[in-house]
Amino acid sequence: MAHGHGNKSNEKVVYVGDSRVKKNPNTYIPPDYTSYPGKSEAFIPNFLLKEWMVGAVVMVGFLVLTVAEPAPLGYPANPLNGSFIPMPDWYFLFMYQLLKYPYTSQDYVVLGTLGVPGILFGGLMLAPFLDTGKERRFYRRPIASSLMFLSLIAVIYLTNVSWTHYQHELELTGTVPEHIEREEKAREEAEKGGGGGGTKKPAVIPIVAEDDPGAQLYAKATCVTCHGADLKGMPNAKIPALRGVGDLHDKEAILGIISNGYEQMPAQHDALIGSGFSEQDIDKLADWLSKQKAPAAE
């Protein structure tokens, strides 16, 4: 503090600091940008830390939803259903359609599955480092905005093309998706039964001659894959039960089905021979299946 002669009210005072307080040069205090209009906080670590915390909260919420509402199981896979058209979930339709094009499939499948997504996600990760401009209005950032709109248009276009092509295939083949067919049958049964309370369950047909050698052959046959060890089949996948099959087909007819197939089921003769069956084994198997008849009504 400068001193003058006497006590004057306009005396000039100069503060030079206190030498008794030592300054720690290693202390990092994030700058306060509120006093600087147009400025923002540092990207690393301030802004990035906030983004990570928000992402962690969203991830926890998403995990809670997945635990509380588990994903529903689909229908049993049926390798004999030639009319089934595989389709991914809606949010993967654009990628599904992309992999149909020549330069992203077959010999170029690595480019379609790793190359293109790698470029897109890599560019998204590097965007904060490549686009260092201070302007934040999208119409003054032509490159970033153009890439964003181009990606959005591409995703919408590929999704629409994929879904339209799927609907066209359904109409062309006359196929009704399994989930729609199941819902229609359930609705019809509910209407017939007055809400399901008066529906009468069909009688259970037992397996006939479980100790027969043909039963042991069936357990080793390829028939088990689709019709099941309990001969109940897969009604949802249009695979009929073999319980009571003897009421519909005799032994000769069953041998013909094994050799020539039936409706959507291909021939099983060669598959049985390949798995170690002899012609006598196939004859015994057909004989046992012909015995599977419903018990006579009393």
Image (cartoon, rainbow, N blue to C red):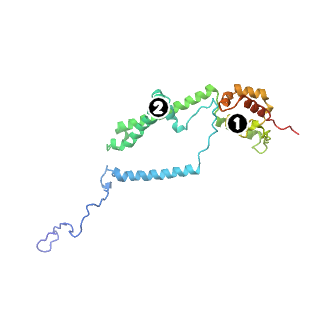
Residue at 67%, 32% (x, y): give it: 276
**Badge 2, how many Cα within 10 Å: few under 14, some, many 20+?**
some
Q: Amino acid at mark 2?
A: Val
Tag shown at residue 109:
2
Viewport quadrant of the N terminus: bottom left
Residue 164 x/y as whole percent = 55, 30
Q: Earlier in the sequence, mark 1 or mark 2?
A: 2
Q: Amino acid at mark 1?
A: His
Q: Would residue 295 be found to the left or right of residue 184 on screen?
A: right
Q: Nearer the viewer, residue 65 or 250?
A: 250
Quadrant position of residue 140: top left
Residue at 14%, 74% (x, y): give it: 7
Viewport quadrant of the C terminus: top right
In the image, residue 113 sits, relative to residue 15, either above or below, namely above
**Badge 1, how many Cα within 10 Å: few under 14, some, many 20+?**
some
Q: Nearer the viewer, residue 225 or 94?
A: 225
Residue 230 x/y as whole percent = 73, 40
In the image, residue 68 sits, relative to residue 272, either above or below, namely below
Distance from Cα at disc 1 to Cα at disc 2: 36 Å
Residue with the mark numbered 1: 227
Residue 85 x/y as whole percent = 59, 31
